[in-house]
């Protein structure tokens, strides 16, 4: 309880500096999340590949010094829950709140990670901490610190917590993360083929919907252009929350949206998660530093949110969701094999190389899974977690006192603690632990250990090259040696490395030492056509006289932004046979997906149709025209 006494001292120092309005009852928050009573589900991974992860969790972990001023400005300007008066945007305490979001996101995200890791198969839940950056071209953006997002994953979850920038509204209705109150920001997305009508976007916190939609659309378009140009480099999606701060999304009309609830989950729309100021169980918070075996955040939000993610995993085709990510991962080992994979070649030479490459990708997934465990241990179980729990318990005590006293002056206690956590973050993240914390909060420097968890702490980048060393701030255990056993056919091999770069070099070397030359050859400039386009596109797969033939993948995009991508069989350059086709039109919101039988480029026969805002349905087509309901037993499903 020493933290409470220290904060109490701080209160006396600042009690006369800030007077806020509001009444005690407004800071109580919701007693439960909309996901709290979500029905438990079991998840069985029927994927043909062992290389893919089930869930990648992304979150803001640290900020580069060059991005700090832009981040603080954007945070105060793009407030969730109201508009901050101009006079309050530049207050020092507002920057402290912005910093506290990073500090607390690092802590609270571990609850979600732990719950999913406990519920899902071993080593299939990975963490992807991001660093927030700024440059003139992109503005405020983020980049993953680890190679996590290079591993194929069924779904990706963006997570952080949020607090309203204006402290004068702290005890009023806007969202806040303080004491027993937590406001989660939550987005679930994946590859465009995961849910084609929404470009792979499944769920988003309401304020981020427009941004998340735009990012998913941009990610899909970027991938199509990359395929057309036969480029290997992938689009790196920034954190949705960071992009929301960076640039206001141009509102799109008629987005396919649905509210939270089970009744409409089958509708192909984006589920809107409302902004919730969740009140955690005070009984669990009162002695949090002594006993954290029962996580109050897990009880109030995470368990239900994890069930929502599991429900998604149980409803989607894992091979379809990860097919193109697997192809991208294979291209890092062997670009020619990646093309053979798109063509779904069944040759023995291709199969043996594919088995080896996927075994090595699986080994990389296990390596990053070990890094994720290290992050969790360092962040939640180590000194960082201990100090953060002291802070949360102290904040809770302050709020309870405020609620009991119901006097305006006592609101300064909350402001003081917010300033405290922000100042400690600012001081350590700037490499100056003796700076602002000493100047403004003398007598409480014992809390400096909140961020100082390693004698080798590197808190400020001296160049533009970011690396895994930033993780020393939150998980020094990453510096340890990690060993992974790779199994391929009848052989087993143990690969050890200090970091992922070294591990990747070893997997590439191992692959190159064992593969034979690929006997199947594919033309990299084969023509793909579609009746709706006057321009031609590119085909990856078998080619006959310069035209798409048999199995492969084709893509066309015109100058207006209309596009078609097709995976399946082709004849004379046109989709013919069994396949899946995604059509995007620049004037339409979302995409249209057709899976089943094609002839001369058009749906012909029994086809599954998916479009934004509707349930999937089985229809009968004749030469591209819908003639009525189709028989499900006659539907030829695309095999991934």
Image (cartoon, grey):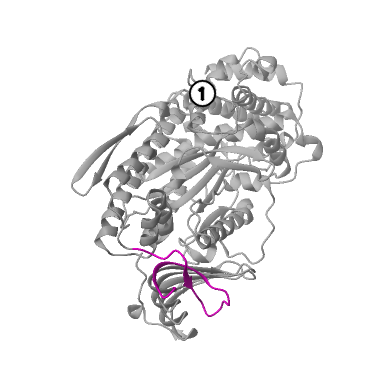
Residue 277, percent from left and from top: 59, 43
**Left or right of 551: which side holds 67?**
right
Q: Say which residue label 1 marks.
A: 387
> Does the segment drawn in magenta span residue 436?
no
Q: Position of residue 242 (x, y in %)?
A: 62, 44
282, 219: nearer the viewer: 219
Visible residue check, residue 80? no
Left or right, residue 173 beside residue 382: right
Q: Residue furthest top?
A: 443
Residue 242 seen in the current view: yes
Left or right? Give the position of 574 relative to 635. Answer: right
Q: Which residues are magenta?
A: 521-546
Q: Nearest the camera: 527 or 326?
A: 527
Where residue 600 sits in the image (x, y, percent)? 45, 82
216 to the left or right of 438: left
Instruction: Name, please, the residue furthest toward the right.
Output: 87
User: Relative to 145, is 190 above or below?
Assistant: below
Q: Determine which quarter of the picture holds residue 66.
A: top right
- Residue 340: image quadrant is bottom left
- Label 1 secondary element: helix
Q: Is residue 509 above or below residue 324?
A: above
Residue at 65 percent of width and 39 percent of height? 134
Residue 382, position as x, y percentages in the image: 44, 25
Q: Quadrant of residue 126?
A: top left
Q: Nearer the viewer, residue 474 or 24?
A: 474
Callout 1 crowding tier (Cα within 10 Å): few <14, some 14–19, many ≥20: many
Identify the image quadrant of the C terminus. Answer: bottom left
- Residue 353 vs 572, above or below: the answer is above
Please give the name of the residue rendered at 33% of the width and 41% of the height, measured from the top-left corner: 509
Which residue is drawn at the image coordinates 54% and 73% (left, top)?
A: 536
Query: How many labels were placed on the picture?
Result: 1
- Whether residue 529 is in magenta: the answer is yes
């Amino acid at each position: 309880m020493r933290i409470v006494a220290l904060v109490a001292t701080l209160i006396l120092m600042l009690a006369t500096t800030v007077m806020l309005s509001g009444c005690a009852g407004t800071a109580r928050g919701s007693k439960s999340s909309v996901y709290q009573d979500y029905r438990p589900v079991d998840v069985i991974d029927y994927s043909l590949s062992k290389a893919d992860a089930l869930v990648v969790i992304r979150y803001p972990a640290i900020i580069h010094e060059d991005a700090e001023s832009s981040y603080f400005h954007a945070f105060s300007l793009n407030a969730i829950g109201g508009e901050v008066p101009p006079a309050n945007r530049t207050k020092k305490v507002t920057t402290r709140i912005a910093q506290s979001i990073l500090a607390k996101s690092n802590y609270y995200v571990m609850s979600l990670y732990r719950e999913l890791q406990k519920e899902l198969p071993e080593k299939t839940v990975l963490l992807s901490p991001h660093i927030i950056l700024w440059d003139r071209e992109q503005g405020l953006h983020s980049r993953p610190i680890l190679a996590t997002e290079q591993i194929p994953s069924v779904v990706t979850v963006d997570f952080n917590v949020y607090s309203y920038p204006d402290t004068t509204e702290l005890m009023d209705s806007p969202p806040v993360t303080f004491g027993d109150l937590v406001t989660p920001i939550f987005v679930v997305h994946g590859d465009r083929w995961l849910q084609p009508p929404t470009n792979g976007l499944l769920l988003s916190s309401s304020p981020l919907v427009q941004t998340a939609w735009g990012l998913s659309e941009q990610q899909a378009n970027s991938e199509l252009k990359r395929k057309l140009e036969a480029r290997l480099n992938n689009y790196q999606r920034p954190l949705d929350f960071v992009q929301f701060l960076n640039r206001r999304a141009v509102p799109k009309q008629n987005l396919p949206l649905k509210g939270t609830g089970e009744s409409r989950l089958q509708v192909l729309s984006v589920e809107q998660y409302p902004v919730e100021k969740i009140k955690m169980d005070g009984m669990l918070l009162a002695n949090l530093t002594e006993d954290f075996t029962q996580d109050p955040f897990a009880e109030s939000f995470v368990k239900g949110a994890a069930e929502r993610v599991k429900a998604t995993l149980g409803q989607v085709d894992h091979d379809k969701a990860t097919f193109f990510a697997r192809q991208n991962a294979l291209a890092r080992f062997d670009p020619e094999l990646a093309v053979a994979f798109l063509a779904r070649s069944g040759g023995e030479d291709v199969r043996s190389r594919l088995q080896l490459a996927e075994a090595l990708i699986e080994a990389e997934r296990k390596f990053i899974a070990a890094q994720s465990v290290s992050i969790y241990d360092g962040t939640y179980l180590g000194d960082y977690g201990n100090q953060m729990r002291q802070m949360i318990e102290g904040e809770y005590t302050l709020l309870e006192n405020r609620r009991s006293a119901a006097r305006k002056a006592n609101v300064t206690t909350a402001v003081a603690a917010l300033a405290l956590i922000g100042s400690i973050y600012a001081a350590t993240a700037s490499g100056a632990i003796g700076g602002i914390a000493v100047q403004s909060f003398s007598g409480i420097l014992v809390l400096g250990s909140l961020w100082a968890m390693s004698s080798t702490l590197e808190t400020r980048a001296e160049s533009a090259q970011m690396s895994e060393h930033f993780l020393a701030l939150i998980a020094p255990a990453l510096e340890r040696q990690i060993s992974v056993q790779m199994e391929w056919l009848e052989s087993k091999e143990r690969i050890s490395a200090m970091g992922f770069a070294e591990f990747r070099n070893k997997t590439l070397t191992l692959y190159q030492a064992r593969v034979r030359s690929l006997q199947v050859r594919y033309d990299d400039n084969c023509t793909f056509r579609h009746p709706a386009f006057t321009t031609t596109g590119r085909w990856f797969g078998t080619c006959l006289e310069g035209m798409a033939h048999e199995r492969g993948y084709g893509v066309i995009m015109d100058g207006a932004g209309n596009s078609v991508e097709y995976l399946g069989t082709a004849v004379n350059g046109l989709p013919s046979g069994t396949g899946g086709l995604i059509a995007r039109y620049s004037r339409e919101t979302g995409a249209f997906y057709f899976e089943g039988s094609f002839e001369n480029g058009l749906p012909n026969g029994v086809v599954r149709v998916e479009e934004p805002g509707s349930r999937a349905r089985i229809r009968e087509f004749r030469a591209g025209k819908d003639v009525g309901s189709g028989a499900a037993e006659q539907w030829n499903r695309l095999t991934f």
